[in-house]
Image (cartoon, rainbow, N blue to C red):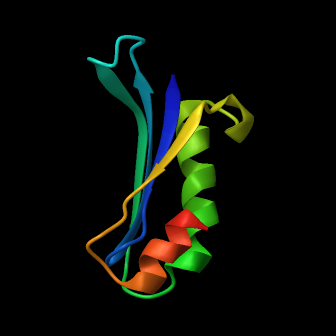
């Protein structure tokens, strides 16, 4: 199972693509992208996701699931990842 994990809750916009084993006991990171900065995560999110997918050699359609942090962080930052 390939998962996209996103964090925009604090001062960076980051995404990782991980591949989890069927038994859920092991996973490996296929790609990780971090874009530092304070504001502007909403504008940086899609380019970060594109870069992570490219680094993993996957299209968005090839992902099986999505995960996002839910805090701590600003309401707007958390909402950006979840939206």
- Residue 70 sits above or below residue 67 on the image: below
Seen as rendered, the residue at the extreme bottom is 39
- Residue 78 sits above or below residue 60 on the image: below
Seen as rendered, the residue at the extreme top is 23
- Residue 53 sits above or below residue 39 on the image: above
Question: Residue 55: horizontal and vertical position, in percent?
Answer: 53, 38
Q: In which quarter of the image is the C terminus?
A: bottom right
74 with respect to 76 (left or right): left
Place residue 72 in its image quadrant: bottom left
- Residue 17 sits above or below residue 23 on the image: below
Task: Report how many numbered discs are placed on residues in the image.
Answer: 0
Question: Residue 57: horizontal and vertical position, in percent?
Answer: 61, 30
The residue shown at (39%, 15%) is 21
42 with respect to 17 (left or right): right
The residue shown at (53%, 33%) is 56
Residue 51 or residue 61, whichever sits in front: 61
Residue 3 or residue 70, whichever sits in front: 70
Question: Residue 43: horizontal and vertical position, in percent?
Answer: 60, 78
The residue shown at (70%, 36%) is 59
Seen as rendered, the residue at the extreme right is 61
Place residue 45 in its image quadrant: bottom right
């Amino acid at each position: 199972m390939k998962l996209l994990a996103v964090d925009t809750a604090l001062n960076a916009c980051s995404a990782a693509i991980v591949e989890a084993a069927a038994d859920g006991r092991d996973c490996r990171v296929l790609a990780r992208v971090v874009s530092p900065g304070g504001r502007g995560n909403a504008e940086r999110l899609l380019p970060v996701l594109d870069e992570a997918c490219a680094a993993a050699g996957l299209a968005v359609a090839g992902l099986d699931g999505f995960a996002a942090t839910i805090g701590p962080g600003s309401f707007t930052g958390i909402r950006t990842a979840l939206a």
